[in-house]
């Protein structure tokens, strides 16, 4: 039996507000851009930063929660699967889009020091309030 694993985990900041829409069958979907930045030391000893951008797609209840609570600049942890999708422009030019199909989004940090939503919107009943963690 062939088995595989497709899992991606990233922590970054929203570069855009979520864009919420509904499929023709009424299924909610939201997407947003997420920036992750890493620092490293170059060969010359100078510290450099490198930023990678991801498109994150959330469906159903997670899409609605993401749309309700997240805004540009907010730090989040996203877990999901990586998908590479091919499509054509109106001019017939081929394009490829790389996306993370989210199954979990954790809100990190606080905006203006206020609590504004569950820590784990995909499953708020199993949410962990970071203030209750003993370490």
Image: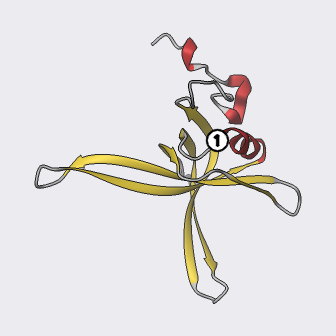
Where is residue 97 drawn, in percent x and y? Answer: 56, 68
Q: Furthest residue to the bottom? A: 91
60 on left or right of 69: right
46 on left or right of 102: left
Please give the name of the residue rendered at 63% of the width and 39% of the height, measured from the top-left corner: 104
53 on left or right of 102: left
Where is residue 108 drawn, in percent x and y? Answer: 54, 32
Q: How is the image coloured?
A: secondary structure
Q: Furthest residue to the top? A: 134
Please give the name of the residue rendered at 61% of the width and 53% of the height, measured from the top-left corner: 32
Q: Furthest residue to the left? A: 44
45 on left or right of 40: left
Q: Nearer the viewer, residue 25 or 34?
A: 34
Please give the name of the residue rendered at 78% of the width and 47% of the height, measured from the top-left corner: 60
What secondary structure is found at the residue carrying circle 1?
A: loop
The answer to whether residue 129 is above or below residue 16 is: above
The answer to whether residue 122 is above or below residue 128 is: below
For label 1, the residue is: 70
Where is residue 23 drawn, in percent x and y? Answer: 82, 61
Q: Quadrant of the C terminus?
A: top left
Where is residue 50 drawn, in percent x and y? Answer: 33, 54
Quarter of the figure with residue 120 = top right
Please give the name of the residue rendered at 58% of the width and 53% of the height, measured from the top-left corner: 16
């Amino acid at each position: 039996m062939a088995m595989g694993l497709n899992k991606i985990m990233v922590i970054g900041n929203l570069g855009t507000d979520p864009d919420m829409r509904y499929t023709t069958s009424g299924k909610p979907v939201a997407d947003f851009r997420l920036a992750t930045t890493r620092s490293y030391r170059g060969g010359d000893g100078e510290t450099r930063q490198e930023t990678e951008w991801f498109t994150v797609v959330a469906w159903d209840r997670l899409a609605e929660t993401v749309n309700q609570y997240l805004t540009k600049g907010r730090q989040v942890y996203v877990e999901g699967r990586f998908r590479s999708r091919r499509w054509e422009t109106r001019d017939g030019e081929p394009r490829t889009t790389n996306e993370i199909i989210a199954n979990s989004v954790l809100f990190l940090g606080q905006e203006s020091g206020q609590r504004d939503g569950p820590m784990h919107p995909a499953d708020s009943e199993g949410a962990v309030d970071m203030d209750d963690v003993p370490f």
